[in-house]
Amino acid sequence: MEFAFTPEQDALRAEVRQFITDNVTPEIVAELEDTGIRRRGPKTRDLYQQIAERGWIGISWPREYGGQDGSRIDQYIVEEEFARVGITVGGAGSGAPAILAAGSEEQKQEFLPGIIRGEISFALGFTEPQAGADLAGLQCRAVRDGDEYVINGQKMYTTAAHYATHIYLMARTDPDAPRHRGISIFLIPMDTPGITVRPLWTIQNNPPAPLGTTYGDARTNETFFENVRVPASCLLGEENQGWYVGAMGLNLDRVGASRYLISIQRDEDIVNWVKDNDIEGYAMREDPTVRDRLADMWIEGQVCRLMTMRSMSIVENDGAFTYEGSAEKVFAPEHGVRTTETIAQMLGPYGQLLNGSEDAIEDGVFAHNLMGAFQSGINHGSVQVMRDQVARRGLGMPRV
Amino acid sequence: MNVLPSEEELMVKNAAREFLDAECPSSLPRAIEQDERGYSVELWEKMASLGWFGISLPEEFGGGGLPVTYLGLILEECGRAIAPVPFHSTATAALAVVGHGSAEQKQAILPRVARGDLIMTWAVQEQDPRLRADAIQCRGEVDGDSLVINGIKHFVDNFAASELVVMAVRTAPPTDSSAGITLAIVPTNAAGISETRLTTLAKDSQSKISLDGVRIPLSSVIGEVSQGWPATSEMLDTGTALLCTQIIGAARKDAEMAIEYAKNRVAFGRPLAGFQSIQHLCADMTVWVDGAQLLTYEALWKLDAGLPYGVEVSQAKAFTNDKCQATVRSSQQIHGGIGFMMEFDLHLWYRRVTAWTMRLGTSFEHRARVARALLDQPGEVRLGMNLQPVA
């Protein structure tokens, strides 16, 4: 075991931080706040180009597709530092892990360098009105017709669908096969005729959550497919193998820098705030109950960090998760909720004041987090489904 | 960064597990609960022959020279087997000698420990059991070439089995530059020592020690008179991290027994493991012990790396206390009635894990220490940073 980063990795982190200090200007921050975390305005797009030119995106991907053949830990470090200032890099949720694992040579050439340059981005088309945690019940149909597929159906919570270039779509290709065996994945340009996107606003909508709030995106979408014709080359992996292809991407999507930060940033925020701030002479940092609860949260935050590092260590050693990714996806989101609710009871009536309100603490980040933290226990596999997976894959218990 | 144990570490851990599976069936700790000596001489001797007691002692004193993480991995397996041997107390005391003892003390003590010829323990706590210098009232007075000790030491492990006890006593009032504590090596058979055995939940060996004019030579002092608090504090931290490994090993085994039981026990027409409520409880138990293990490994790794590790030890112990207690209680829940029958083994683990969580610092004490480090010194904090403990 080795619980430190290498000197080279420390140097990389310092370099990224310096880059952020030098280049993430107040104008860029304003643009990020204005457009939401993942949508990129013109200034942010320029910044992204600079980040890509430094080789900081897709570090662990093969050189032939624009990566560095580098370490997954290096990539994690870059992702974490940028995510801390509200900038998503490195392709979390991009579908890239699944393309790397299951894509054809043409698909890898088509997508990966473009993802790295920031020219291609994906919305995830998994969930449907009747298929959420029970994803294998999805009904969106893709029917083969010569060299094409014709797609009909509806996808829910397609966050980013209103600005992504592509959608990573899971659809049923064989309605007669057992549920998991009749599903395929498609990589489809969003400008294909027949696709329409309708906004769904989350409870974070108004007033807008401050930058860095857990699940700060106010907008998600539902996306409709009406006789959408796509070439058969859009298929990722084998037809009817989509469940297994998708699992590769999802496993990696559930762990890593953004999942970690979603769960722990409020731990750091509240400790640093309590250190330096009194409320009209009430020094919360001296209250024994507050101190005990803060320490408790901090320790759980460390567990989140170490579970993230465990997942990264497994990936870096080319291992496969048995249950570790799911374990992290149980502990970290629930920790985020415990922290958020503890902070609420610390701050009392100040804890309910939203962004822009008179007397809001830290732009209302803690209040907004009460509408966001629990989302992390729902999205990308609920904590109940994750517990099922720990029990089945990790402990060899039967499917109920 | 690779938080997974290396191949070499796993080899040692697996070898320890294989040995203890064969040599320490549950009948052994069960029998030792009724044994006056409080430990298995036979198991101790077999373990000595494998070189475990010296694994992390310096090679020049007959040890294996491996990092303390290796010792932790073996003690984790001892916890798993709830092996009735005074290994933890011996290792804790011996490492204090490694860290702060004189050349003569090291030469006299460490080779014997490495061979398994010397059982030791440590004594810091008193009737006020808080692990802080100002709770130490047991008096030491320098008299010529001697130190004379009067007072009480409480909750001392394996006293009857031990030949030497590394003891913290008060030799001066606290000042700004010194806590006034002296750490000294005291023979357990010294004139003026009397022992009262305690009856613990774990039914293992703890004692209350009364010292009445106990006289030892000044050469038995570790370091300087009245300058022993840093060494004492380090001994407590090392002992705490090592105790965490034992608790984790025992809690993991306890959880595995529940998981196995759930797969085999049929109720309402299916195995318990076919009920989601049971699956989720087992998933939580697994996640809890994993978390405790990661925190503990990080603390031990930092100790080996020469980094500040006191805060990490407190993180590990607070989390281990709460979550391993929850784990063994949940295991009792899954087992139902049979789990608390004397003839069934589960309680052997439950009672030990529960008792161990109360030793070497409660969750409250350790969280208070984490809070001091976070809140009572300047500077922005971030998870994963090296944080200095604040006394």
Image (cartoon, coloured by chain):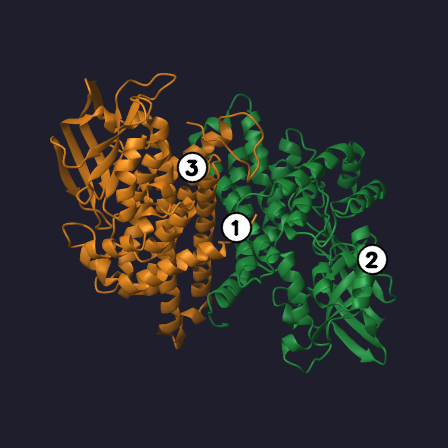
Chain colours: A green, B orange
Q: Report the chain holding disc 1.
A: B
Residue A298 percent location from the top left of the image = 51, 40
Residue B247 can be seen, yes or no:
no
Q: For the residue marked with disc 3, what is the amino acid?
A: Arg
The residue at which mark 3 appears reads as B367
**Mark positioned earlier in the residue sequence (3 or 1):** 1
Task: Evaluate whether label 2 is on the same chain as label 1.
Answer: no
Position of residue B369 relative to residue A259, above or below, is above
> Which label sits on residue B3?
1
For disc 2, the neighbor class at 10 Å (few under 14, some 14 to 19, many from 20) is: some
- For the residue marked with disc 1, what is the amino acid? Val
Q: Secondary structure at mark 1?
A: loop
Cα separation, mark 2 vs mark 1, equals 38 Å
Specify the subunit that label 2 lies on. A
Asked if disc 2 and disc 1 are in contact, CB closer than 8 Å, the reply is no
Q: Please give the chain letter of the residue carrying mark 3.
A: B
Question: Which x, y percent locates residue A356?
Answer: 70, 33
What amino acid is labelled 2 in the image? Thr
Q: Is residue B37 above or below residue A104?
A: above
Label annotation for residue A165? 2
Q: Is residue B257 above or below residue A47?
A: below
Measuring 15% from the left and 55% from the top, which residue is drawn there? B34
Q: Nearer the viewer, mark 3 or mark 1?
A: 1
Q: Residue furthest bottom?
A: A176
Determine the residue positioned at 32% across, 32% down. B103
Check whether the beta carbons of the residues at disc 3 and disc 2 lie within 8 A of each other.
Answer: no
Residue A34: which quarter of the image? top right
Residue B287: horizontal and vertical position, in percent? Answer: 47, 55
